Image (tube, rainbow, N blue to C red):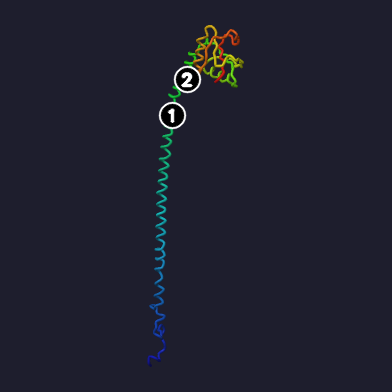
Amino acid sequence: MTTSDRPDQPGEDPSGTGTNSPDSGTSGSRRARPPAPARSEAAHLPLRAGAMLLLAIAVVFIGLGWHSAATGDSDPEAGLEAAQSRQPTSSSPATTTSSGAETSASSSTSTSVDPDRPRVCIFNAGTVGGLGQTYRKLVDDAGWTTATPSNLQSASITENTIFYTGTQQEYAEQLAEELGGDISVDPRPAAFSQCQGGLVLIVVTR
């Protein structure tokens, strides 16, 4: 029997191509697929590295924030308490000095005022309204006792004048000096009977 007359044996490929052979090219291509997951894992490595870097930066900033808060809360409070504790001490001498100055001024004023000084009666003989009240304030500020100002019609008096009687000349000159300006100091006329016992201040101009 020749070779061509024999029946095909199981497992043999008459065409000789070896299609069903375990060593064929089809089986080889299927075994080459496993490296694909390795490439996918390598692609995710940069993302993981970036996430770790961001996490490390966040931890550093949180640590710096805690440190800044811890040091910032302690120092300003200590400085504020120290400033508040020093402030009353530094202001006390100034207050004491001011009180002492006021006491000294009050004592000086009270001792300089002569209780025997006569009161001052003010008459407005000019044409300026409110002139009597203006001079009354000046006389009051100088420490004199005043009466309510009145108006006076007199053509013979043309300048500011102080009339005095008896021993009042020294007081009249003192008042004229304290008021300043051009004020005449004259004995009281016998015909002038108002403001008995006091100095008469007749004002015509400011």
Residue 193: x and y in percent read 60, 9
**Can you identify the residue that label 1 sits on?**
87
Mark 2: which amino acid?
Glu
Compared across the picture, whether 176 is left or right of 14 comes to right
Mark 1: which amino acid?
Gln
Residue 9: x and y in percent read 41, 85
Q: Residue at x 42, y 45 (%)?
A: 65
Q: Quick one: SS at disc 2?
A: helix
Q: Residue at x 40, y 74 (%)?
A: 29
Residue ranking furthest to the top: 166
Q: CA distance from mark 1 to mark 2?
A: 23 Å
Residue 199 placement: quadrant: top right
Say if 10 sits above or below 192 in the image. below
Q: Quick one: SS at disc 1?
A: helix
Say if 30 sits above or below 201 in the image. below
Q: Residue at x 43, y 39 (%)?
A: 73
Q: Residue at x 42, y 65 (%)?
A: 40
- Toward the viewer: 25 or 47? 47
**Residue 31 bears which disc, if any?**
none
- Toward the viewer: 129 or 139? 129
Residue ranking furthest to the bottom: 1
Residue 162: x and y in percent read 54, 13
**Can you identify the residue that label 2 sits on?**
102
Given this view, does label 1 or label 2 mark the residue nearer the observer? 2
Residue ranking furthest to the front: 156
